[in-house]
Amino acid sequence: MINPILLVEDDENDVFFFKHAMKKECVVNPLRVASDGQAAIDYLQGAGAFANREEFPLPSLIVLDLKLPFVMGLDVLDWIRRQPRLSPIVIVLSSSQANADIGAAYRLGANAYLVKPSDLAKLQEMIRAIKDFWLTHNILAADSGMEGEAADLPRSQRRALIPASYLSTPLPIHENNYSITR
C-alpha cells in the first residue's frame, strides 16, 4: 500500500490546483485533504471520522499551510513533532515569506518551507521537485528506529518517513572534499 499525502489547506482553489499539479506530475500517492488544523490533528490521531486506518492510513508526507481555521499550522506542526509515534515529512507550503514564520516552522521541525507559487506551472514544478526528492529518492536507514506499521514495510516503501530524532541532529556537509559541520 502506498501511503497518502495529507494536504492541510483551507483554500478550495489551492486544493484544486494542488490536485491538478499532482495529476500532471503522475504522483501516485493518494491525496487526503484536511481543511483546517483540527481536522489534520484528528486525522493523524485516527479520531472520530478518521478512526478507520484502512481508509485513512497515516501519511508519509504532510503539506501544511500556516494560516488555518481552528488550529494554526505552526500549532499543528508543534503537535506532530510532540507525538513520539509520528515521524512524517512535513513540508510547509504557505503564502507567507515572513522570516518569523519561516524560522518558527524550522524550529518546530518542518523538513522544508516552500512559498506558494503564483501560477500553475510553478506549482507543477514544485510538485515535481517534491515527488523527485521526498517521494522517490529519499530513503531511510534500515535501522531508523521506526515503530509500528512503518517498521514492517519493505525498505522501498519506507521512503519519505523520517524519525523525529533525526530532525535535530546536525549533519556534516561536504564541499569540495572538505568536511564542514554547520
Image (cartoon, rainbow, N blue to C red):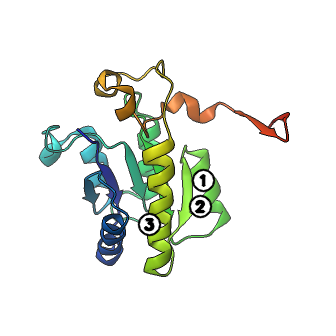
Which amino acid, mark 3? Lys
Residue receiving disc 1: 104
Q: CA distance from mark 2 to mark 1?
A: 5 Å
Q: Residues within 10 Å of mark 3 (few under 14, many from 20)?
A: some
Mark 2 vs 1: CB contact within 8 A: yes
N-term-proximal mark, 1 vs 3: 3
Which residue ends up furthest to the bottom in the rendered image? 119
Q: Position of residue 95 (x, y in %)?
A: 51, 72
| Residue 137 x %, y % | 50, 43
Q: CA distance from mark 3 to mark 2?
A: 10 Å
Q: Residues within 10 Å of mark 1 (few under 14, many from 20)?
A: some
The residue beneath circle 3 is 67
Disc 2: which residue: 101
Disc 2 on helix, strand or loop? helix
Which image quarter holds the C terminus?
top right
The amino acid on which the numbered mark 2 sits, given as a three-letter code, is Asp
Q: Give the left or right position of residue 57, taking residue 85 as reference.
A: left
Q: Secondary structure at mark 1?
A: helix
Residue 164 seen from this side: yes
Which badge, 3 or 2, comes first in the chain's sequence? 3
Q: Is residue 121 left or right of residue 8?
A: right
**Residue 47 picture quarter:** top left
Tell me the amino acid under the disc marked 1.
Ala
